[in-house]
Structure formats: C-alpha cells, structure tokens
Image (cartoon, rainbow, N blue to C red):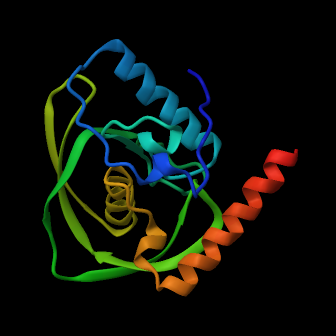
Amino acid sequence: MTLRKILIHPDPRLKAKCTPVVDFTTDLAKLADDMLETMYHAPGVGLAAPQIGITERLIVLDCVKEEGGTPEPIIMVNPEVVWESEERNVYDEGCLSIPEQYAEVERPAVVEVKWQGVDGKERNEKFDELWATCVQHEIDHLDGTLFIDYLKPLKRQMITRKMQKLKREMARG
C-alpha cells in the first residue's frame, strides 16, 4: 500500500465532477487500499478519489472512532444516495482537503446508499449518525462539492483564504 498526497483546497481537481468506474481490476482494488491507508494515516473518517487527484467515483470511509474500536472500512465504487430521510442532523464537519477548518453543515439524518464493491457487485445499505454525514460528504466530493459550499459566502471566502495561505506556507517549506 502507498500513502497518497491529499490535495488542499483550492485546487481545480477538487471541483471536478467524477466519471463512473467501469473497470473493476486489481488496480482499482489497490487504489482503494491506498486510499484507506491514506485516510487512516491523515487521520480521517472518509476520503474521496478526487482528494488524491483521481476523478473517478470511488470513496472510502470508516467512522469507528472509539479508542480500541474495531475498524469497519467500507469501499464504495459509483455510490449514490437512493433515499434520504426528511429528518435532518447538523454535524461540525471537517475535511482532509481543508485541514483544521470546521463548520456546522445540515444534512439528511438517514440515507440509503447504493454502490458497487471493488468486485463490481452491487450493495445497498442505510446509514445514520456520523456514517450518514460522512457518506454524504464523500459523495459530494465526487460531484465537485465541498462542505464549505454549504456555508454563507463570507465564511466560505474566509476559509478559502486560510487555505491559500497554508498552501503558500507549504510551498515555501
């Protein structure tokens, strides 16, 4: 497995609409494993392919955060929300591509997601709590949407300026 570089906002690749995966090869499985390793190393609870510069519809997530908890990694190829509850939840969201910035985002409390595994087999499951927020956040990435896109313009601009400054500092070393 290989750690991948996580893109930092603003980067045009983070705003691209991703293409569906059609080839279910060992390369896809390796990419998914690399993404899981990168996500755990960051550390984070979700990662989408565009965050490492790949514009394909692939996400990974694992919302088990308890110390000593058993990891429950999920790899989703071509995921889509097929049902959402009317009930809403608000979570203080963050993003590996927008480090150390958090904001409250309101989303459906429960969602049902259909996806394929790296083997191409279809799966379907309902998610709630942090899992629901995370899967919606990661699917948003596949459509070029960041959690800051849900914020008021002034707050979004402030976070974007902070990220531009961070990128300049990182470039200087």
Image quadrant for the C terminus? top right
Left or right: 168 in relation to 110: right
Query: Closest to the observer: 74 or 21?
Result: 21
> On screen, 18 above or below 45?
above
Residue at 62 percent of width and 29 percent of height = 3
Return the residue found at the far front.
Answer: 12
* The quadrant where residue 58 appears: top left
Which residue is situated farthest in the right direction here?
173
Q: Residue at x 29, y 15 (%)?
A: 25
Please provide percent x and percent y for residue 117: 24, 31
Answer above or below: position of 38 versus 144: above
Nearest to the observer: residue 43 or residue 162 = 162
Q: Is residue 131 left or right of residue 51?
A: left
The front one of 91 and 167 is 167
Q: Position of residue 64 (x, y in %)?
A: 47, 53
- The quarter of the picture where residue 4 lies is top right
- In the rendered image, the quadrant that contains the N terminus is top right
Residue occupying the point 58% across, 57% down: 9
> Eyeballing the image, is 157 above or below 19?
below
In the picture shown, does residue 22 fall above or below 44?
above
Tell me: 154 left or right of 21.
right
> Among all residues in the image, which is located at the extreme top?
26
Where residue 22 appears, x then y in whole percent?
Answer: 20, 25
What residue lies at 38% left-to-right and 16% top-to-bottom?
27
- Indicate the quadrant where residue 63 lies: bottom left
